[in-house]
Image (spheres, grey):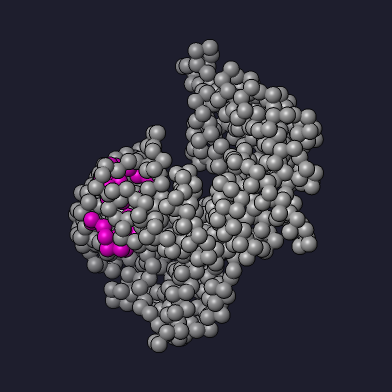
Amino acid sequence: MTTRTPGQDPASTPSTAAGPSTGATASTPPGPDRPSDLTAAVLDGSVLTPGTPARTAVFEAVGADPGGPATRELLSLTRHLSPAVRRTALTLLGELTYGRTPWPAPAPAAAAALHDPDPDVRRAAATLLVRTGAADRARTALGELTDPGTRIALADALLGTPDAACPPGPLRTDPLPEIRLLGCLEELATAPRERWPELDAQIVTEVTALTAHDADRGCSIGARWGRALHRQEREQDCYATVIRLLAGEAGAYGRRVGVQLAHRAFQEWRAAPGTLAPHLVQLLPTAPPGLRALVVHALCASRTATRRSVTALAALLPDPTAPAADPTGPGADPSAALAWDITYALATIDDPRAAPHVHALLATGARPPGMLAALRGVLRAGAADTAQLADYAGKLLRTEGHDALSLALGILDALDPAAAALCVPDLLTALRAACEAAEARGATLATWPELSLVGTLGRIGPPAAAAVPLLTTLTRDSRRRPGHGALALARITGDRAPVEACLRTRRPEGRRTADHSALFRWLLDHGGLDREQSAQLRAAVLGRPGVMQVRGSLVLWRNEGPPVAAELLAVLPGYLDDDLSGPVAMTTLAAMGPHARPVLPHLRALIDRRTRLPLYAGSADADLRADEQLLEAAERTVAALTGPTGTTGTTAPTNEP
């Protein structure tokens, strides 16, 4: 099933279809030989892929008319001859229920599909039935049906839906151990302390009786168990349970649940990776492939766990001299995906052992998710072949597509200017093409490709002198990244005039404060700020919260020094628990040295948390890594403020306009 945020379709591409039920063009109307765009997308399964026009169109259509033609078309497809089509239609209807519960229109189709001959169709129907608001019908079906997979799916959906009014207690005596286990886990989350031993014992008993669990198709049993223990603040009990399960106390399936529970513990408690990683590592030599992959995934999810197990993980990597396999290609070998997980984890903690494997993948042209972060890691480790990276970036620049351009520019921005300068001709060609495309569309503001290409040319500096004639002819600007052209010209030519003119003529601030910090920083590094510019910087940084305040604080500190310390200490602590702004604010605090020591209680409170910060980086594992990186930055800052000199250098984080 496509992962989505409840109430919001993940598609970001605007609809290009005329409508979900009549998506064909006028010249080729839908008919016996040409289905509608929606039906065609259900037939091939692409409607479950975020960003497809048919998916966007159906979400728009159902949002406007929940009982309209799009819904009727989908309901008709739940009776299609193909099980895959029926399953796709029911899954999509289930996703469409977010934000529309109760939505009774699909309930009859879902109830009928509970008796479908295909087990996956029955599971999708069970989930849909509960999500339509038909909890009474679902509870009745749970008591009447005999198919285990359907009953488990019904119990899972009922327990996971707050308004379903399904008390977990009675499910603990169900004939199916899977349902008894689900009931126990749900009850454990809110049970009083005196009932914990009873529930703990039954959970272990039910896990021991299983060899697999149908409910693992959604949220794993280990994740559910971890959620219940976290809700009850049972950190040490969680660790002890993981250790017993990994030791085999509950059998082979119990060991799998133990790995899942450890992974969930990593996501909830900061001490979990250091405590549990050694026990996970012990499984790697003898674990069967499926369990080994689960262990590797858990260890690689956490920067701390990766560091604790780096030697064991590196030993699992294939021979870097052998042909590399694309981990994301059609029919990709699971071992290739596992190797990429390890490579990415090692690279992002700056371990040089990842470099040969990253470069081997580059040679194949593969671009797995996270490639840019991995490349930056091997560059920080000093293990990258910069000539190969520049050549690879040049090839990407000659490739059409947003993703290729984004990766190319990310690589060039990470390279030193001398290496990146090899791609100046390709950058100029790409910039001209982006400008022509924007002109053809009648754009008045600079587009993302123009902004990014100009910024990259500026970061290359004097070796990009060939770009000056083109840069001086660009007239479009953007409020999102103000002064990008002026800064690029200044960096290439060394002339202050473009940046000074930009600051003199900048637009009045709107609802959001624009980030001009890079402009001020460049002037400060190339002759300093005059009185008017200093006043302008002070007003921009201290005037209102926002990106300019946090990113411009270091420039303000460098310009004014100790007299501005109290004003900075009044605003910077408010950013410390933000995974994006926190490290930037800490860079300023470290540069302030002893003058920033009043902020030490805030930093120590951040460090002393037992649980993860409530961040929203895109997934539970992304939140975990973001919390770890923020914690690492806080520890470095405390060390800088309490060290012998109480200060560090004043190098700012990357902060481009």
Residue 466, image quadrant: bottom left
Q: Main secondary structure of the magenta part?
A: helix
Residue 149, image quadrant: top right
For the residue pair 232 and 554, the one nearer the viewer reads as 232
The residue shown at (59%, 65%) is 611
Residue 449 in picture, x, y percent from top left: 35, 48
Residue 336 in picture, x, y percent from top left: 37, 43
Residue 520, image quadrant: bottom left
Residue 205 in picture, x, y percent from top left: 68, 49
The residue shown at (54%, 52%) is 259
Residue stretch rendered in magenta on the structure = 358-386
Return the residue found at the far top.
32
The residue shown at (55%, 63%) is 272
Is the C terminus in the top left, top right, bottom left or bottom right quadrant?
bottom left
* Residue 377 shown in magenta: yes
Asked if residue 295 is positioned above or below residue 71 in the image, the reply reads below
Describe residue 304's horizontal placement relative to residue 454 as left or right. Answer: right
The residue shown at (57%, 29%) is 88
For the residue pair 198 and 468, the one nearer the viewer reads as 198
Asked if residue 59 is positioned above or below residue 189 in the image, the reply reads above
Asked if residue 509 is positioned above or below residue 368 in the image, the reply reads below
Describe residue 343's horizontal placement relative to residue 126 as left or right. Answer: left
Q: Is residue 122 visible?
A: yes
Residue 301 in picture, x, y percent from top left: 48, 55
Return the residue found at the far bottom.
644
* Residue 110 shown in magenta: no
Is the N terminus in the top left, top right, bottom left or bottom right quadrant?
top right
Tally the marks: 0
Q: Is residue 452 visible?
A: no
